[in-house]
């Protein structure tokens, strides 16, 4: 039997796994090299490697190796090979050339010299010359130049072996199949599989991990569904031997071990549909179950006891949007979910950034460097034991005051004015106490210019105070206004026991016009995470005039959460998207959020990631709302219209005046509302009155009183709100 030397190429970091795989296929003298793994064997070993390797990119049958210090040496070495024994004159060929030397400066030139040598061999024998076909050649020739040595071989695989043939539509930037198989092996799937344990992919995308895991479970050769091979155009090919090996591969198919379950979830319904199509193409529907489900709703299956298993996940890497901070929030949510729901399991998580790995918040016991195409990535392995506790979330660092004992400011140090204000704050705290407890409200307004001398709004965000001054009348001396503002801060520090060494987030509030409402007041970039109902939301207490969360709209957001299940939600003038988060967590089928501000839309994307929600299912659109509504060609079941009182953004030609433009806005929004849908129209203009003609065109209910929460009862005009429905 003729013995050959083969080279199995593979992605970076897989060589140590490829060595035992080739040995198990009958390969001899298996050695790991820079280019991959070399081995000896008969032609059948090469065929089995093509059919069964889960890790290799290509299987190269090596023909020769020779020295080449120049382009002429390369030509001569190639011309000395018996190409007529390998390639028919009527066939096509392609040269895959890699490497450089002083004389061969680029791969295209190297490939050209190799092609010329092969063609001239045929011409010298009076035969017609083979043609070049770079896309689908009959024979692909592999040439590698390294340190003055040239290795030449025939690519038996033809196209990369990671292309299994089961993907009907891979979607964007899919994980290569052989890399997915390597991740599963590194994560301990073969051992868990043998023990009958389950596997869950909480962000399954097109289902690559699930399908590769299922093929391992059923002993399905990964090349079984390929319909084209490189060896089919090689004159040394033995069809009978290949057919025998392929038939043996089919005969080895088996049911998965008892107890093995493969489950995948993704917030993007389109990704789930792609996964379903690929799973169906292989007939694996009984073994793999995929469902649309956002990360934040992931729980351990309860239909049977699953003490152990594997979580494997390839979350987004942030390469597309370049939003590393957003991805950190998503990875943090992933860490929290798997730590809470899958104690006792193992986890393997891929990432392209060290910062994302740290954001998971769990201690990884093993890390492997890999690459997916041109992207360097890392596999992190975790034991989800009770001792592997979550690290503190940096975003929650200031949500609790753990330094109350350091407060040195006693009540007797306050001025008379500050004491008077402090007494009012104590009274308000007492009044709100039972409501806060029963409603589980952690972000609320404690004081809103209750006394004219202290015209400030004092809010509390999970223990963190926030003070905003209303602009004092021109008749008030600036020095006096500054003194009162400092008294207000002293009262807040005393009553809320805020440490002397921690500044109170505070700002001077003035009426904003146009672009001024988006101006930064500071550059700290610090955000904290707060809770409202099911939602977790990011607020910034220092950098902007507004914090990112309008507290007075809390009841309306909770109403949207209750009504959103199964509906298509539209959020116009969406701000930072708090209402979108509530609707999504309430079970909205989809949401679309529209705003002109890049700052607020990025904030919304971060809020989505923080709650484990898919940006594909919950679409974010930067546009002028009226312009977008005019072009909108779809309908929604639930709409929130909450425009500013006035805007003259540079991104639009005109201005927005809520009193003047209310009818146009409402009509446009109602035009995209389904016949049985509901629109909520809200605004914060204190003297706003709804136009009478709107009351005639639609069924309108004033729900302002129901939407003003307990902590804003003093300001009954803090906002206005109506429920709109179409007349039947």
Image: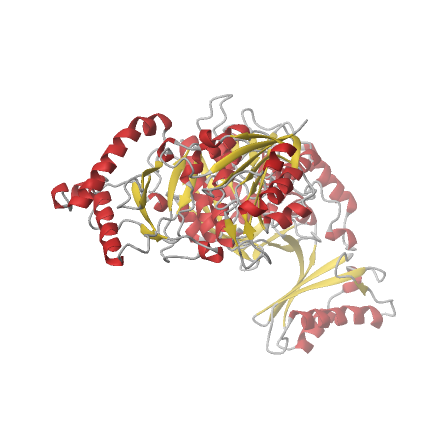
Residue 655 placement (x, y as % from top left): 56, 54
Residue 302 placement (x, y as % from top left): 49, 23
* Residue drawn 50% across the image and 43% down it: 577
Give the residue at the far left of this rendering: 412
Residue 419 placement (x, y as % from top left): 18, 42
Q: Left or right? Give the position of 159 relative to 491.
A: right
Residue 526 placement (x, y as % from top left): 36, 51
Whether 710 is drawn above or below 524: the answer is above
* Residue drawn 68% across the image and 40% down it: 634
Whether 173 is drawn above or below 446: the answer is below
Q: Please name whichever residue, 126 or 288, is drawn nearer the observer in this view of the structure.
A: 288
Residue 21: tell me if it is visible: no
* Residue drawn 51% across the image and 50% down it: 646
Q: Quadrant of the C terminus?
A: top right
Give the residue at the far front of this rendering: 475
Q: Please name whichever residue, 642 or 393, is drawn nearer the observer in this view of the structure.
A: 642
Q: Left or right? Give the position of 46 relative to 115.
A: left
Q: Please name whichever residue, 457 or 236, is drawn nearer the observer in this view of the structure.
A: 457
Task: Tell me the quarter of the picture where residue 725 sits.
Answer: top right
Q: Left or right? Give the position of 87 relative to 649.
A: right
Residue 686: tell me if it is visible: yes
Color theme of the render: secondary structure
């Amino acid at each position: 039997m003729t013995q050959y030397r083969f080279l199995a190429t593979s992605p970076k970091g897989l060589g140590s796994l490829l060595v035992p795989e080739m040995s198990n296929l009958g390969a001899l003298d298996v050695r790991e090299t820079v280019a991959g793994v070399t081995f000896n064997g008969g032609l059948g070993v090469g065929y089995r490697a093509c059919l069964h390797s889960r890790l290799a990119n290509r299987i190269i049958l090596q023909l020769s190796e020779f020295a080449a210090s120049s382009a002429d040496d390369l030509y001569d070495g190639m011309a000395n090979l018996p190409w007529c024994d390998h390639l028919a004159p009527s066939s096509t060929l392609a040269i895959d050339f890699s490497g450089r030397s002083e004389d061969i400066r680029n791969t295209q030139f190297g490939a050209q010299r190799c092609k010329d040598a092969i063609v001239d061999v045929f011409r010298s024998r009076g035969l017609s010359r083979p043609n070049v076909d770079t896309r689908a050649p009959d024979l692909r020739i592999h040439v590698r130049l390294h340190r003055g040595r040239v290795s030449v071989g025939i690519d038996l695989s033809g196209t990369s072996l990671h292309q299994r043939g089961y993907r009907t539509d891979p979607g964007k930037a899919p994980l290569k199949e052989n890399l997915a198989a390597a991740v599963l092996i590194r994560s301990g799937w073969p051992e868990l599989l043998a023990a009958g344990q389950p596997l869950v992919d909480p962000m399954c995308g097109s289902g690559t991990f699930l399908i590769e895991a299922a093929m391992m479970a059923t002993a399905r050769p990964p090349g079984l569904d390929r319909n084209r091979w490189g060896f089919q155009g090689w004159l040394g090919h033995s069809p009978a031997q290949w057919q025998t090996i392929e038939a043996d591969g089919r005969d080895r198919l088996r049911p998965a071990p008892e107890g093995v379950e493969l489950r995948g979830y993704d917030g993007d319904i389109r990704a789930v549909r792609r996964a379903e199509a690929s799973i169906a193409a292989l007939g694996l529907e009984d073994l793999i179950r995929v469902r649309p489900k956002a990360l934040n709703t992931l729980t351990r299956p309860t239909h049977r006891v699953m003490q152990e298993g594997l979580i494997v996940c390839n979350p987004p890497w942030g390469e597309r949007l370049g939003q590393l901070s957003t991805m950190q929030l998503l990875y943090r949510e992933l860490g929290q979910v798997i730590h809470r729901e899958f104690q006792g399991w193992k986890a393997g998580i891929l990432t392209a950034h060290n910062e994302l790995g740290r954001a998971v918040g769990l201690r990884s016991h093993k890390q492997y460097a890999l690459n997916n195409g041109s992207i360097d990535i890392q596999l992190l392995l975790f034991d989800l034991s009770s001792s592997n506790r979550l690290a503190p979330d940096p975003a929650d660092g200031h949500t609790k005051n753990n330094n109350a004992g350091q407060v040195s400011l006693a009540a007797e140090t306050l001025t008379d004015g500050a004491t008077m204000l402090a007494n009012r704050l104590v009274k308000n705290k007492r009044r709100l106490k039972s409501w806060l407890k029963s409603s589980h409200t952690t972000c609320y307004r404690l004081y809103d210019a209750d006394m004219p001398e202290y015209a400030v709004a004092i809010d509390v965000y999970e223990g963190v105070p926030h003070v905003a001054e209303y602009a004092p009348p021109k008749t008030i001396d600036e020095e006096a206004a500054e003194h009162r503002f400092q008294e207000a801060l002293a009262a807040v520090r005393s009553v809320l026991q805020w440490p002397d060494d921690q500044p109170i987030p505070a700002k001077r509030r003035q009426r904003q016009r146009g672009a001024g409402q988006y101006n930064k007041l500071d550059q700290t970039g610090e955000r904290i995470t707060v809770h409202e109902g099911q939602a977790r939301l990011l607020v910034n207490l220092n950098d902007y005039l507004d914090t990112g969360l309008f507290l007075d709209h809390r009841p309306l957001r909770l109403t949207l959460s209750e009504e959103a299940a199964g509906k298509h939600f539209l959020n116009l003038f969406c701000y930072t998207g708090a209402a979108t988060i509530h609707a999504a967590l309430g079970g909205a089928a989809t949401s679309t959020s529209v705003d002109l501000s890049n700052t607020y839309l990025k904030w919304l994307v971060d809020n989505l990631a923080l709650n484990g929600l898919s940006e594909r299912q919950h679409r974010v659109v930067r546009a002028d709302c009226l312009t977008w509504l005019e072009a909108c060609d779809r309908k929604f079941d639930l709409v929130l219209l909450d425009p500013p009182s006035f805007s003259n953004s540079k991104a639009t030609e005109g201005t927005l005046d809520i009193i003047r433009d209310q009818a146009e806005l409402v009509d446009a929004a109602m035009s995209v509302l389904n016949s049985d849908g509901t629109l909520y129209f809200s605004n914060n203009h204190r003297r706003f009155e709804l136009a009478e003609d709107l009351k005639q065109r639609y069924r309108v209910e004033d729900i302002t009183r129901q939407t003003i929460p307990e902590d804003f009862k003093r300001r009954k005009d803090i906002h206005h709100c109506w429920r709109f429905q179409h007349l039947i």
